[in-house]
Image (spheres, coloured by chain):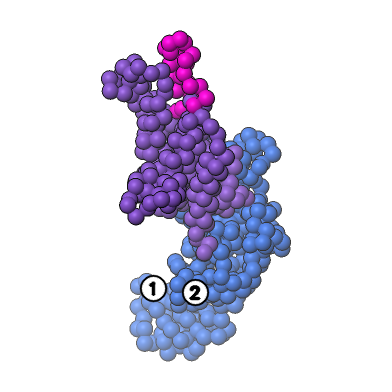
C-alpha cells in the first residue's frame, strides 16, 4: 500500500476544508482526484506531502507516517504543486541538479540527463527557467518531481495551461509512470480522469462522495438512461413526452431529441414504435453512456 | 544544508546582488579610509584601522538586510517554499543553508580589506608598528556582528513575503540590537548597575570589547546566543503554517 489516508480532517477557522476523508492508493495505479474548485483537493495533497499538518487523521506513505517519520515519507514522494512554483532565475539543469542534491541522489548528473530526456526538455536544458514557455515549465515541474525516482507521485493539476498537444504528451507520460508507481493527480478536467486514471475519488465540500474505479462509477450511475433520437420531420415536444417511460425530453438540435428514462428500462423500442405509429422517419437512435461529466454533476450538485 | 548553501551563493553571483554588495562595500571603505580627508588614514597621525571597524557596522546595517531580504520572502512570494519544505530536509537545514550563504557573502567582501592591513602595516613608523592583536580581535568581532545581522535579516525575511518590508524590518532590528541599548542605557531611569546591564544587551558593547583584542568568552557566548536566538525564531516562523 503506497498511500494510506485515514479519517483526515483539516479545519480552517470554522470551515472544514477536509472532512473525514479516507482512501488508499496502490502501486501501479493512477488515482484521480476530482472535485469543484475549493473542494479540498489541494489541501488533501498538501497534507499528504507533509506541507500542511492535519488536525486529525493518519497519513502514511509507503508505511511511513507523515508526522512521526517525515524524512522517510518525504523521500518517497515526488510533488508538483498547484501553480508549479519554480526559481525563474535558475537554469533548467542547474535547478534539476539542485533538486537531485537535496534528495541525495547518488549519480546526479546521470539522473538529471535522464529526466531531461524523458520529459522532452533536451533542447531547452541550457535555458533559464524564466525564459521557458508554460508547457516547458510544466515539464521542468514534472522532471523535478520524478528526479529522485519516488514511489509516489502527487501532481496537482499537471496539465493546466497546456496546449492540446502538450496535454496528450503529458498524459501519456503520467500513464507510463502509473505502471510502476503510485500516481495521485488532481484535475477539474473530467476527460482527463477518463483518459488517464484507473480510479477516481470525487470530493465535494471537503467530503468524499465517491471512490471507485472509473468503470464501476459509470455503471453505478447508468440507472438513468439517456437516448438520442433524430427524426426527419418536425415533432411537437408534447407528443414526445407522451412516450411510455420517458421522464424528460430535451431538444438538442432542430430535429434531434434527448430522452431520459428512470430506471434500467430501455426506451428505444418505445421510441421506434412511436415513430412508426406517427409515420415519422427515424434517422438516428442511440443510447448514450453516462459520462464522467454527468456523474460529477450529479454528485457535486 | 550544503545544496541550499551553494544554490544561494550561485544566485548571489548569477544575479547582480553579490557583485553589488562587495563592490559597494569596498568602494565605500576605500573612499573613507584613503580618500576623504576627514576620515582618511593618510590625514590622521596614527597607523590603525579604526575607521574600518567603526564604519563597517553602519554599512552592514544596510547592506546585510539587502542581501538577506529575498532569502525567504521571495520563496514565499513565488511559492517555491512549498517544494523546499516538502523535501527530505529539516527546516533547520533550510534556514542554516541560507544564513551561512549570506554570511559567506559578507565574509567575501571583508577579505580584500586585508590589503588595508598590509598597507597600514608598511606605513607605520617604524613599519609594523600597529596593534595586530586588536585588529585580529576586531575582525573576529566584525564577523560575529555580520553573523548576528545576517541572522536578524533572515528572520525578518521569513516574516513576510514582501522584500521591501523584510529589508526595512531587518534594518530597524539591526539598528536596535546594535545601538539602541547603548543609547537607552543613558536614560536617567537606569543608574548604578542597571545601566551597565542594559548596555550589555546591545551588540555594540560586545563588539567594542572584542576590538580590544581580547577574546572574552562572555562576548563569544553573547554573539552565539544572539545568532541562535534569531535562527531559532526563523525556524519557528518558517514552520508557522504548522501551528
Per the rendered image, the range of residues in magenta is B108-134
Left or right of B4, for residue A65:
right
Queried whether the magenta region covers residue B154, the answer comes back as: no
Residue B30, above or below B216: above
- Say which mark, if any, is on residue A30: none
Camera-nearest residue between B113 and B164: B113
Residue A32, above or below B130: below
Give percent across and percent down for residue A237.
36, 83
Does dot 1 land on a helix, a strand or a loop? loop
Chain (purple): B
Q: Which chain is mark 1 on? A: A
Residue B71, above or below A25: above
Residue drawn at (41%, 87%) of the image: A241
Circle 2 packing at 10 Å, graded few (<14), some (14-19), many (20+), is some
Residue A197, above or below B152: below
Q: Quadrant of residue A234?
A: bottom left
Residue drawn at (50%, 53%) of the image: B233
Q: Magenta-highlighted stretch: main secondary structure?
A: helix
Q: Which residue is mark 2?
A: A16
Q: Quadrant of residue B218?
A: top right
Give percent across and percent down for residue A290.
53, 73
Residue A211 in view: no
Camera-nearest residue between B234 and A292: B234
Q: Which residue is mark 1?
A: A252
Residue B100 in view: yes
What colour denotes chain A? Answer: blue
Amino acid at each position: 500500500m503506497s498511500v494510506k489516508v485515514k479519517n483526515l480532517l483539516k479545519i480552517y477557522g470554522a470551515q472544514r476544508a477536509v472532512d473525514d476523508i479516507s482512501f488508499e492508493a496502490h502501486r501501479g495505479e493512477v488515482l484521480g482526484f476530482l472535485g469543484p474548485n475549493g473542494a479540498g483537493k489541494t489541501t488533501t495533497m498538501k497534507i499528504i506531502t507533509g506541507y500542511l499538518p492535519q488536525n486529525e487523521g493518519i497519513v502514511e506513505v509507503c508505511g511511513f507516517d507523515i508526522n512521526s517519520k517525515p524524512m522517510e515519507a518525504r523521500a518517497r514522494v515526488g510533488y508538483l504543486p498547484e501553480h508549479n512554483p519554480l526559481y525563474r532565475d535558475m537554469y533548467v539543469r542547474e535547478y534539476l541538479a539542485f533538486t537531485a542534491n537535496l534528495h541525495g541522489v547518488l549519480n546526479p548528473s546521470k539522473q538529471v540527463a535522464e529526466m531531461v530526456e524523458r520529459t522532452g526538455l533536451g533542447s531547452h536544458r541550457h535555458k533559464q527557467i524564466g525564459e521557458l514557455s508554460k508547457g516547458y515549465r510544466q515539464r521542468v515541474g514534472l522532471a523535478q518531481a520524478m528526479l529522485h525516482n519516488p514511489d509516489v507521485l502527487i501532481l496537482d493539476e499537471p496539465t493546466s495551461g497546456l496546449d492540446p498537444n502538450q496535454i496528450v504528451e503529458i498524459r501519456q507520460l503520467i500513464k507510463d509512470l502509473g505502471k510502476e508507481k503510485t500516481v495521485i493527480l488532481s484535475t477539474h478536467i473530467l476527460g482527463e480522469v477518463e483518459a488517464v486514471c484507473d480510479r477516481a475519488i470525487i470530493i465535494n465540500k471537503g467530503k468524499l462522495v465517491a471512490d471507485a474505479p472509473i468503470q464501476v462509477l459509470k455503471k453505478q450511475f447508468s440507472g438513468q438512461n439517456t437516448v438520442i433520437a433524430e427524426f426527419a420531420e418536425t415533432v411537437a415536444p408534447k407528443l414526445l413526452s407522451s412516450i411510455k417511460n420517458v421522464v424528460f425530453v430535451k431538444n438538442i438540435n432542430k430535429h434531434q431529441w434527448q430522452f431520459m428514462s428512470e430506471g434500467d428500462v430501455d426506451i428505444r423500442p418505445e421510441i421506434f414504435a412511436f415513430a412508426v405509429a406517427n409515420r415519422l422517419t427515424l434517422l438516428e437512435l442511440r443510447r448514450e453512456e453516462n459520462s464522467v461529466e454527468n456523474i460529477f454533476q450529479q454528485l457535486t450538485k | 544544508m550544503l545544496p541550499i548553501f551553494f544554490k544561494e551563493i550561485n544566485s548571489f553571483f548569477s544575479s547582480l546582488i553579490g557583485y553589488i554588495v562587495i563592490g559597494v562595500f569596498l568602494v565605500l571603505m576605500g573612499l573613507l579610509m584613503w580618500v576623504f580627508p576627514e576620515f582618511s588614514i593618510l590625514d590622521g597621525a596614527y597607523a590603525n584601522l579604526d575607521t574600518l571597524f567603526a564604519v563597517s557596522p553602519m554599512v552592514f546595517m544596510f547592506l546585510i538586510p539587502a542581501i538577506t531580504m529575498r532569502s525567504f520572502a521571495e520563496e514565499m512570494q513565488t511559492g517555491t517554499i512549498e517544494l523546499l519544505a516538502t523535501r527530505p530536509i529539516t527546516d533547520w537545514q533550510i534556514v542554516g543553508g541560507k544564513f551561512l550563504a549570506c554570511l559567506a557573502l559578507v565574509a567575501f567582501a571583508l577579505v580584500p580589506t586585508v590589503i588595508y592591513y598590509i598597507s597600514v602595516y608598511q606605513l607605520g613608523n617604524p613599519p609594523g608598528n600597529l596593534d595586530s592583536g586588536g585588529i585580529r580581535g576586531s575582525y573576529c568581532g566584525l564577523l560575529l556582528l555580520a553573523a548576528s545581522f545576517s541572522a536578524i535579516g533572515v528572520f525578518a525575511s521569513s516574516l513576510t513575503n514582501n522584500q521591501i518590508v523584510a529589508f526595512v524590518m531587518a534594518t530597524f532590528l539591526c539598528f536596535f540590537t546594535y545601538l539602541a541599548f547603548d543609547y537607552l542605557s543613558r536614560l536617567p531611569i537606569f543608574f548604578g548597575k542597571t545601566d551597565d546591564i542594559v548596555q550589555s544587551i546591545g551588540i555594540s558593547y560586545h563588539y567594542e570589547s572584542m576590538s580590544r583584542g581580547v577574546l572574552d568568552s562572555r562576548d563569544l557566548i553573547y554573539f552565539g546566543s544572539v545568532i541562535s536566538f534569531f535562527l531559532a525564531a526563523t525556524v519557528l516562523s518558517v514552520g508557522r503554517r504548522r501551528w
